[in-house]
Amino acid sequence: MGSVYRARDLHFSNVVKLVAVKEMINNASDPLIRQTIVQNFEREANLLATLHHVAIPRIYDYFTEDTRSYLVLEYIHGKDLEAVISEASGFLPEDQIISWAIQICDVLAYLYAHKPDPIIFRDMKPSNVMINHAGEVVLVDFGIAKTFQSGQKGTMIGTEGYSPPEQYRGEATPLADIYSLGATLHHAITRRDPRMEPPFSFAERPVRRINTNASVEIEAVINTALQYNPSDRFPSPTAMKDALMNVARKTGALSKITSALPMSSGGVKPLWSFKCEDEIRGAPVLSQGSLFIGCYDNNLYSLNAADGQFQWKYATDGGIVTRPLVYDKNVYFGSEDKRLHVISESAGKVVWTYYTEGKIRSSPRIADNHVFFGSDDKDLHAVNVSSGRAIWKHSTSAPIHSTPLIANDLIYFGNEAGVFSAVDFRGEIKWRFQAKRAITSSPINKAQAIYFASLDGTLYSLDVKTGWAIWKFRLGKGSVSSPALMDEFAFIGAADGFIYGIDLRTAKEIWRFHTENQVSGSPVVYKDSVYCGSVDGSMYCLEYRTGRLRWKFETQGAITGSPIVYDDIVYFGSTDHFVYALFA
Amino acid sequence: MAEFFRKLLGITKTQNDEPVTASKPVEMITTAPLSDQQLNEITSSAQSAIKYEMKQLVAGVGQSVGKQREHNEDSLLALTATLAGSVDSIPFGIYIVADGMGGHQQGEVASNAAVRIIGGNIMKKFHSYLFNLPTQNLQESLQELMETSITEAHQYVQREAPGSGTTVTAALVLGQLVTIAHVGDSRAYSVFPDGRIDPITRDHSLVKRLEELGHLSKDEAANFPHRNVLIRALGQGEVLEADIFTVSFPQPGYLMICSDGLWGVIDEKDIHRSIAEAPNLHRACQSMVEAANAAGGPDNITVVLAQMIG
């Protein structure tokens, strides 16, 4: 244990020469141990005296008084990096961090080149990195090696945070310093203190998930330094410096990168595109080689999915925002002309239509020969598909835009007053749940839970049987996007412009991806990718476990509908009037 | 429900069913045949089990100071309720195990406070829901409720028993779901009748962390010198991040929660044998405690077993 004092050297009486005096109190009662501690202290002093480097403080003197030993060092005007990080109001500039990191690599390289034995710093962490008034790095506290304290029953250790795994085995090598430098840089760039996190959990907190402005390249350098196996890290500080220099030049040509870089963005070419006469805000459906999609030019289009050739169109008297449904050779869809239209899949000839009292923006679902959908007339309608006649209507307090979910022998849907209802097949209410604002999002079900979002900025998980809230996840803003599920994850967009990946069990965010505008469309998952459009006009393809961008495709208008992916082809519409087909 | 509509509308059977599947071959689903083991499970449990009309939750507990300790620093809460009537019955249970640590009997204080505060908080919230009419759904989600309860207990221990800490594994059973809050190295398991024992929680211990990271093999972990070092404990550290999640209640099977005085001493076979051979849950718990004591009883032993019948 020790303290550091700021002191004035009175030998130089005419000037103020400040020095740092490091004090070590020797409390050991055993004389042998006490002697060892003094020897260690003197060894550190002697070692420091032989070093000459701008980033290492000079040593002036050392002495021992009774139980106290003192080291007189160059006083560094400045702040330690820990203070710099915590006092900054936002993220530190990446260039600044890279510049410091390069200087640290230089001084580490100097230490390792020391003869006869290389010097291992052993305690690299932000509080041991001083930034002097010139903005340059000085390493302080060439501490006596800190060994891991073995715990008795019930001992709790603070997480060491910056120490590499092998340090728990008592190994200290230059590669341990590389790891600790990686941890220090991770802390500096993310502002997340690793001492507050589980040990060795950096891989669970990728740099760019926390600091979205950080470059892919710096993230890759930090990841390499933080590799679990010492042999996977940079072999030397010089190699790490080279990588950092490359980042600084933004060449991207890093030597030892472990994480895959995202694929090109902008190089995606559409397989085909088809122009309608107005905005497309809804989602397509694919059946028997034909793509069906509604448009604000009031038509439902049938296109050949293989080449985008026009097959037929069917005119309604209102915009079509619903996703069509193909069932028994007929296409079902609602229109803002207040009608549910049923037309033949092959020729687009009307089979029957059904009137409601309001515009239809809720997409139909079919179960057991009945079609269920909501309307702006505030009712959920249940219509027999053979006769086209209503068998019941379930009235609610507000328009229904949410598409009903049929599961567990119940029908689940939200309305614009924020009421989420579960009704049985007689149209009778089983339970209700109240959100704070509208539920436009369509629910989805897995196991015992139902998931949907609300304009109140929450993604809800409710017990499928009772409607109890199991968890709530706070989104940055409200959402009209409907969640998609894969494995143990939910994916959803929100008006804050992010696409989120969330763990279903714990309601913890796994990643978030930033787009340039609101995300009103719903994501879909295909193989190991999430596809989602944004009002910024782009369709994004993200790796579903990490949220890494695989590619994006820019259109000339907002994308508010969701895509479908079929046989490795993504189909979607944009408000630029086009329907696009891209390779997934 | 198909039946229901047919009756309602007087439709004759399978008028439309055939063409539907024929026109949409893409969506045809073939189900995989069940394995012998799965079949066996279904048929044997169906044959042996008595038919219960109503879902009900039952539980048993066991505890011992062990053979080598003078104090019991483990604490336990088990509370089981069923509300049944004209609506669906709602099984409800709170099961908490806490293993305290810290000198001068502070460990007891910590574990006891944790159990009381968390249990009390949950009951306070649910009391009006379960026993008052009419009721509304809780505004707080189940996971939020667990989170606030853990935080309150954490702050209490920091204030009243500084320096001490405790593990906590708390389970709130509601309907068919179990919401768990967990810190430290006590454990929750799903125990299945076929002998499978799946851990539900993940230890917050150094040894587990190193094992997860592939740094220690199973054998190395068993002989690791710092087996008792926790990296998270209630009462320790500025910010406490508990693992909070919801899983389905194991059915058919048991939910088991225990301290390391049990899981660190007896193996999965002992656990399964104790449960399989005992006539009821209380005896099963007692038998596991006896087995841990017979193996030396190096630490306090606590166990809860809960089962959903029906």
Image (spheres, coloured by chain):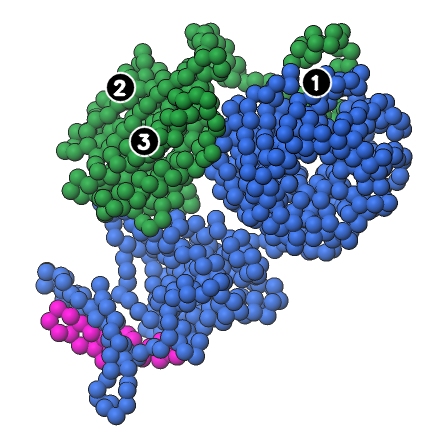
Residues marked 2 and 1, same chain: no
Foreground: disc 1 or disc 3: 1
Judging by the rendered image, the residue that carries numbered circle 1 is A392
Task: Please say if A361 is above or below A264.
Answer: above
Compare residues A581 and B176 and report the one nearer the observer. Answer: B176
Colour of chain B as rendered: green
What percent of the width, then of the height, locates residue B116?
28, 32
Q: Quadrant of residue B257?
A: top left
Whether residue A49 appears in magenta in the rendering, the answer is: yes
The type of residue carrying mark 3 is Gly
Residue A367 location, x and y as percent? Answer: 69, 20
Magenta span of residues: A46-72
Crowd around label 2: few <14 · some 14–19 · many ≥20 (10 Å): many
Q: Relative to B162, is A226 on the left or the right?
A: right
Percent coordinates x, y for residue B16 in the rendering:
77, 14
Chain letter of disc 3 in the image: B
Instruction: Choose between A193 and A258: the one closer to the eye.
Output: A193
Quadrant the C terminus of chain A occupies: top right
Residue at (72% x, 38% y) in the render? A564
Q: Is residue A33 visible?
A: yes
Which of discs 2 and 3 lies nearer the camera? The answer is 3
As drawn, the chain in blue is: A
Q: Which mark is residue B287?
A: 2
Horizontal placement of A49 versus B131: left or right? left
Task: Measure the alpha-carbon separation of dots 2 and 1.
Answer: 58 Å
Asked which quadrant contains residue A152, the reply is top left
